[in-house]
Amino acid sequence: MSWIDLRSDTVTHPTPAMRDAMRNAEVGDDVYGDDPTVKALEDAAADKLGKEAALFVPSGNFGNQLALLTHCDRGDEVILGDDCHIVWHETGGAALIAGVQLRTIESGKGVMPVDAIRRRIRIGEDIHWPKTGLICVENAHSNGRVIPLSAMAETAALAREHGIPVHLDGARVFNAATHLRCDVRDITQHADTVMFCLSKGLAAPVGSIVAGSADFVRRARKNRKLLGGGMRQAGVLAAPGLIALTDMAQRLAEDHARAQRLAEGLAALPGVSVQREDVHINLVWFRLPEGTDGTALAAYLSEQGIKANPPEDGLMRFATHWQVDDEAVACTLAAMRAFLAG
């Protein structure tokens, strides 16, 4: 059965070109630093992001936690939004791995007010206080919104004023750049380190990138080994990553356009409330009519060959990607219409 999978943009299969690249990849032992395909991916990613160096890691979660561990001393405090991925969906790893305290800020749909950040920076050497070790930002945000460059610039300027590094969770940073119609460096210039996912939207089967200064990446490489992320003949995974970074990063506007069509079609259904103003990238969030059984809906969609997660806290999400074409959008809207019609 050919499924329409709207659960996430992590569900994509490798493209035919990626499968060919995996089959033909030149490999070595990356722990020894002699896998040429991994090196090529890391060099290309660093150049693309405007950073000195980059490191190939197994996942985005791994990359963010590696950044916290490498930036911070144990007991440091990390300032970040209360609705960001590191807080909500990384299993409390910051406490367990880096041993840091998260000091959250209520954000405006992903934007942290710079004055709120300023109030939370620990200034001075009070023996009762933890040190502010890091500020984390997220763009595109996991709520689907793209954070304005002006907000990132303000945060970066404040951080530099106090000598605090900034880490960007840029899992979908190429989606953000596509929405802003800017070079990805226009976003990443406002962060000392960046993590982005090759396997979210860019369709690689495995992997993420952490990039920053050469010294940071040198230290992160050792910490990657400490965390069990040292990989051997990883060129077979890096090869599709190179295609993700080049070819697939250039076609994200197609996913965004289909997300807009999904949002428009859903909004036309009786009782469905779509957060239209939040559809910046490939994620569509919406609420079902009051009294609708979301679990029953997910089961019905499955019967129609459509995979979707049931609502969480009343919100349901559809994600578009390279395997969701125009026909898939039309089929999804037809199935939603049929279910809601009873």
Image (tube, rainbow, N blue to C red):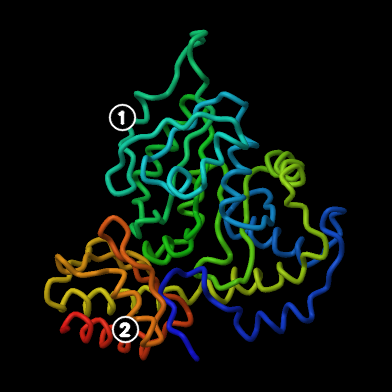
Q: Residues within 10 Å of mark 1 (few under 14, many from 20)?
A: few
Return the x and y of residue 290 as percentages of the image width and height: 14, 65
Question: Which of the 4 image quadrants contains residue 44?
Answer: bottom right
Depicted 12 relative to depicted 327: above or below: above
Return the x and y of residue 297 as percentages of the image width and height: 29, 75
262 displayed left or right of 19: left
Return the x and y of residue 147 as percentages of the image width and height: 35, 51
Where the C terminus falls, by quadrant?
Answer: bottom left
Marks 1 and 2 in Cβ contact (< 8 Å): no
Give the camera-side residue of 271 and 106. 271
Depicted 309 relative to depicted 212: above or below: below
Q: Which residue is drawn at 83% across and 73% down?
A: 26
On the image, numbered disc 2 is attached to which residue? 332
Helix, strand or loop at label 2? It is helix
On the image, numbered disc 1 is attached to which residue? 115
Question: Which of the 4 image quadrants contains residue 203?
Answer: bottom right
